[in-house]
Amino acid sequence: MRIGVLCSGGDSPGMNAAIRGAVLRGVEVHGFEMLGFMDGWRGFHEGDAVPLDRSAVRGISPLGGVILGTSRVPPFPGGRAEPEALDRLRSRVAEYGLDGFLLIGGNGTQTVAKILADAGIPAIGLPKTIDNDLGGTDYTFGFDTAVSIAAEAIDRLRTTGESHRRCMVLEVMGRNAGWIALHAGMAGGAQAMLIPEHPESIEQIAEWVLSVRDRGRSSLVVVAEGFTLEGSDGEVTRGGDDGFGRPRLGGIAEVLAPLIEERTGIETRATVLGHVQRGGSPTAFDRVLATRTGLAAADAAHEGRWGTMAGLHGDRIEMVPLAEAVGRLKTVPPERYEEVRLNFG
Ligand SMILES: Nc1ncnc2c1ncn2[C@@H]1O[C@H](COP(=O)(O)OP(=O)(O)OP(=O)(O)O)[C@@H](O)[C@H]1O
Ligand SMILES: O=P(O)(O)OC[C@H]1O[C@](O)(CO)[C@@H](O)[C@@H]1O
Ligand SMILES: [Mg+2]
């Protein structure tokens, strides 16, 4: 069997371990030939591919980023899966002699996997995203690493903030879901976690910050990049989009800090963590999750279980229909937010 592997969307710590797991199981156990396309669909379109064998994946699990590169280059011209575009892709697949794809990525990538599988082009999904917002799986690899980095940032901001009696606002990633803010905030004992799923008013945030000051502490507020203030008309962006039609989010911490300062009289500083939380070596948890995802995906290809994604359920990796994964984003449920909100301030 000849299998193509590619990554699309943002990178996520653990992608290398996933590739290694898939290759160790696919090549060494099932006798696959595997081909890695460079920079996602760009490599596929331009014939830029490398053989993936045991030596290609030696020692890569601890490495950040991804050896194949990743991109948001669309699989179909203009991004639309028209019948002619699918036919073109199908004949390209035949030219490469591929029996199927392993596609590593987030919601968009899994949507593409489903489109391909539905059109009879065999594909299996390996879910990644630091945002942890994919359905069909309990956790995506990369999330644990991002949370650890954000929690460490909170610990560090906390000591400087306390020393100056300042309010510190930390902005973390999370476009549509506040998982990173929620978990990092819990780990670091933040006084408030602001997430996209639950807008809050500036008056409420200022009240929390003041109550923290009144009991002799300094506030640490974590905010997800996709958070919106009550009554505002959308997320704060850096202006324009990322070249692939997505607004470039970022800057909500810098919007909040002066508003908090103005309302509380407490000096407030903003820090935007940005891509630091996506870079560097994955945690052991993410390496294990990603490796197991790769192993399961290669087994599924061997068994012909196309149109599925390797999801984590409890402590088991199970193949779930792609439709279950891409149907809707997995956002923070109201009860998980309420659980922490009762103790904000
Ligand atoms: N509905 C769709 N139809 C066709 N192509 C799509 C669709 N959604 C996404 N894609 C393509 O899939 C690729 C990956 O999508 P996207 O950029 O959203 O990343 P992702 O996999 O969701 O990861 P991230 O979590 O970083 O957003 C892109 O090349 C994009 O063009
Ligand atoms: O690296 P880029 O393309 O700016 O994308 C950033 C986005 O990717 C993610 O890291 C994952 O979807 C989001 O949290 C963030 O908004
Ligand atoms: Mg996406």
Image (cartoon, rainbow, N blue to C red):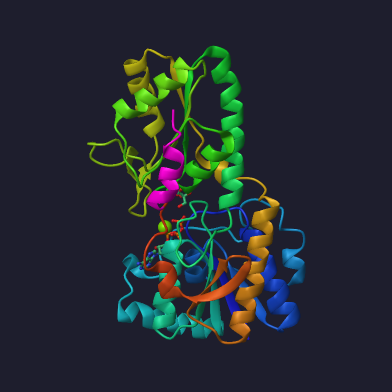
Q: Nearer the viewer, residue 212 or 319?
A: 212
- State whether residue 50 appears in this view: no
User: Relative to 336, does residue 94 appear above or below in the rendering?
Assistant: below
Residue 31 location in percent, x, y? 72, 84
In the image, taking residue 52 as reference, residue 224 lies left or right, namely left
Label total for image: 0
Residue 315 location in percent, x, y? 63, 66
Quadrant assignment, res 201: top left
Residue 46 location in percent, x, y? 50, 68
Residue 153 location in percent, x, y? 58, 33
Quadrant assignment, res 200: top left
User: Relative to 342, does residue 263 appear above or below in the rendering?
Assistant: above
Most common secondary structure along the magenta stretch: helix
Is 343 covered by the magenta stretch?
Answer: yes
- Which residue is drawn at the image coordinates 48% and 41% (left, top)? 181
- State whether residue 191 appears in this view: yes
Is 69 covered by the magenta stretch?
Answer: no
- Which residue is drawn at the image coordinates 57% and 58% (left, top)? 69
The part of the chain drawn in magenta is 333-345
Quadrant of the rendering where the C terminus is positioned: top left
User: Relative to 65, does residue 319 appear above or below in the rendering?
Assistant: below
Q: Nearer the viewer, residue 71 or 133?
A: 133
Q: Nearer the viewer, residue 247 or 283?
A: 283
- Which residue is drawn at the image coordinates 46% and 43% (left, top)? 173
In the image, taking residue 4 as reference, residue 267 lies left or right, namely left
Ligand 3 placement by image quarter: bottom left
User: Relative to 296, does residue 69 appear above or below in the rendering?
Assistant: above
Quadrant of the rendering where the N terminus is positioned: bottom right
Quadrant assignment, res 244: bottom left
